[in-house]
Amino acid sequence: MLKAHVKNGKIIRFETDNGEEPQIRACMRGRAYRQRVYSKDRLRYPLRRIGKRGEGKFERISWEDALNEVAARLIETKEKYGNPSILLVLGAGNQGMLHGPAPVVILLNQFGGYTRFWGAPSYEGALFASMATYGTIKTGSAREDLLNSKFIIIWGMNPANTIQDPGTSLMMARAREKGIKIVVVDPIYTDTAAVFADQWIPIRPGTDTAMLNAMANVIITENIHDRGFIEKYTVGYDKYKDYLLGIEDGTPKTPEWAEKITTVPAKVISNLARDYATNKPSALLAGWGPARTARGEQYSRAANVLTAITGNVGVNGGYACGFMRAYSSRETILPGKKKGEKPQILEKKKQAPKKLRPQDNPVDFNAPPRENTLYKLSGGTNPVNTRIHNSKFYDAILKGRSGGYPADIKMAYIVASGFLNQQANVNYGIKALKSLDFIVIHEQFMTPTAKFADIVFPINTFMERDDIAVPWLGSPYYIYLNKAIDSLYESKSDLEVCRMLGKKLGIGPGMLDLDEKQILRIFAQPRKDIKNFNKMKRDGYTKIKVDEPFVAFKEEINDPENYPFPTLSGKIEIYCEHLAEMNNPLIPPVPKYLSHDEHYDSPKAKEYPLQLLTVHNKRRTHSSLESIPWLEEIEAHAALINSIDAKARGIRNGDLIDIFNDRGRIRIPARVTERIIPGVTCVYQGAWYDPDENGVDLGGCANTLTKDDHSPGGAFYHNSALVQVELFEKQHAEVSK
Amino acid sequence: MTQYGFYFDQNRCIGCHTCSVACKDWYDIPAGLINWRRVELVERGTFPDLFVAYTSTACNHCGIPPCMKACPEKAISKRESDGIVVVDREKCLGNKECNMRCLNACPWKAPQFGPEEGAKMQKCNLCLERLEQGKAPICVEACPMYALDAGPLELLREKYRDISKGIDIPGFKKFYPSLLLKKKQK
């Protein structure tokens, strides 16, 4: 939470929540926000491109001209090619309950629809696995509940840098102070590992499933699994056991088998398995990073299943993994299911004819499900076949229907998204964006993506409008973002832009024409936890009183007769029949360790022997907050490389290095460190793509190197890329942190 | 005299810099050389046996401030009421004139100078204006880990009993820094 001090219409400083506990204290990125609002690089006026796409040459135009041009192009595209030829690209870079994508979605729904994506790079693998195992994404527990654990494993998760809800790091610290043993499994000795872990287990990236399978093998063969729990609450245990013991494929998934793959000593794997299974309740927090890999669903599925076979689901101090949404103040209905209510199965529901609502995209409406979707389950990712996977935008733009995609894309409408920088394979993306007829973007800065737009609408920040911030994974609060200052320069809110554009398109009057506070009232009305809108607005927040820390699946465990799991079987699906029906070896019905074309053991590794990680850092939120001086000085712009790999290449700390593969080449200072496993280099995602005349990315954008592909369940390749590293120039920068 | 000071728990510090960024925002100090509060990284060891910790340090408002003694112009003084060490920038000669004797005398590098010629000393004043309003220093209020605290040393010692004895800060016996430090152990 930020409290802005305003003097003469200008924000002069911030304070944070210093009121009732638990306080919602802002992070470093929030504290630095003033430098973003008043950045000299803020976009001031509507712009029209005058140079080539990507060149960054624009002219100032009036709002009238900008809106007329966008309206004309929208109408022309719709008439000539139909609504599916309009690609809507939505991001979360500048998003509240109202502003950001929402008004554009409302507007374009009324305009007849658009082609949209499916799959969120952050978590799609984890989400798919959560749905397959539990039938829901609401699988997490409140952070306070960690204090009820006897043993905690933090796997591929770094809240010390990423936050993941206020209080996450604090509760980990308090758990450690309470004497609860914490183990961190991660290829990097993260700040989370450094501060909270009693033990760090470095693991080769993308091999997490092998280790989790081996842990399950140890637990089963040593008979320390929870047989009663498995019988009562799960299906398919025997089939998973057949895979683990090698009955299915002749390879027992022993710790020795996993050691060769993961580099983690077999003894360490066995001990971790024993500690986890015998110190109950024990919490395994499986982060999304390892699920952001080519076969990421398998890691997440294996973690979910491990919590189930040890009976750590639905109990205080345990943890079910899954998607990890905990207390959900996002919910619009009363919490919990009604007693005896059967889970909703979409297949049956579909019979009833539906009426198009304002929130429905006409292009998606009533479209049949895609291949490889959990379409029978309620929730999760929208499964319609009119959508394109997020990682396949570029391929879809370039190939269209003849390439098997649902539409021929002619124009892109981009909102709050730096997707050229944040989607895999930037160089391929440039080809795609150059091929489009027209691109319009809502932006605050001239991002690498905005440079490709034909019209740029300058958008204000959340300090310049009213909005409501919805908490992220599972904290019981809302923040009301009162407007602190007037919009700077000629910038406008997303709502204002859509309202004006709607008039040009002949749409309305409708919801967009209401005052923003009226709309927020309408949005807030069905939210069960917003009981007093006026008070929330006056206080700037509403904190929801909860009697005890939220723990997912308590009802399902305590009263299984009346509260079945929302899966097809009504139980936790160790073996998932819905997956079996898909009959796709890349998303098997039990969680399996699978290799792929960007893995350490693929033939490609001969040429590109290092594995690339593209994790989050402290100084940015994805590509937002780039070039904020207060944040730039807290962490070096550099790639992590282990001293062994650096020495073999004649690289010393602070040297400028090239990291490359057949997709691209970046140039970036090296941070030679002991804090990363050998064989791996890490480029923090989010740095802005900035090519020189030879196409070498001097900005150090991680996605210049990543692969634009996905697993059938939707998991992205962002942490699955093979690269090589070479020295470019000695002693380039001071890199100390 | 009541002596005010800081408490810092190194075991809790995640190196997020929220304290130092909040300080810069509150006092409107641009990125660069001037850092009233500094977060430093300590790294030791070889893969995979490592020790990593962060230290967040401001001014320790010493019982016997070495900076005060070093200043040729008596520009640095210690307040009677709360022991907070403050600088009179009118009296300070600037960075070139005396070669920053206060900074060189301070084991924690608390005195800060800008890059420009003649830049005068500035440093953490424990947010004395906020203290007067009954508020915590901005860094203390900012820390998401509750690793920082501030107030009369006696009260801090009472509140954090577990570290009241073993203060092993270098230079402690010479300068009596007003800091309760809970050090991270390997």
Image (tube, coloured by chain):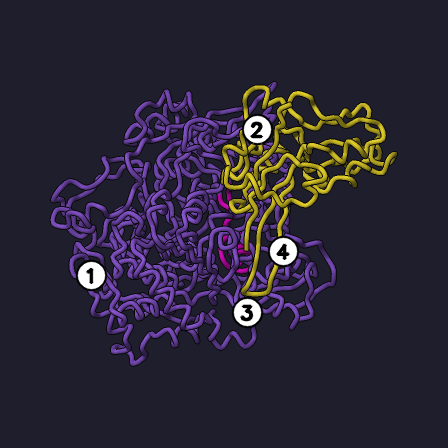
Chain colours: A purple, B yellow
> What distance separates the C-alpha of mark 1 from that of mark 2?
54 Å
Disc 4 designates what residue? A638
Disc 3: which residue: A679
The three-letter amino acid code for the residue at tag 4 is: Ala
Q: Write down the residue under mark 1.
A: A230
A545, above or below A565, in the image: above
Which residue is under mark 2? B151
Precedes in sequence: disc 3 or disc 4 = 4
Q: Nearer the viewer, residue A130 or B185?
A: B185
Which chain does the numbered disc 1 sit on? A
Whichever of labels 1 and 4 marks the residue nearer the N terminus, that label is: 1
Q: Element at badge 3? A: loop
**Amino acid type at image mark 1:** Ile
Indicate whether A680 appears above or below A699.
Answer: below
Q: Earlier in the sequence, mark 1 or mark 3?
A: 1
Instruction: Look at 39% across and 61% down and name the residue there.
Output: A296
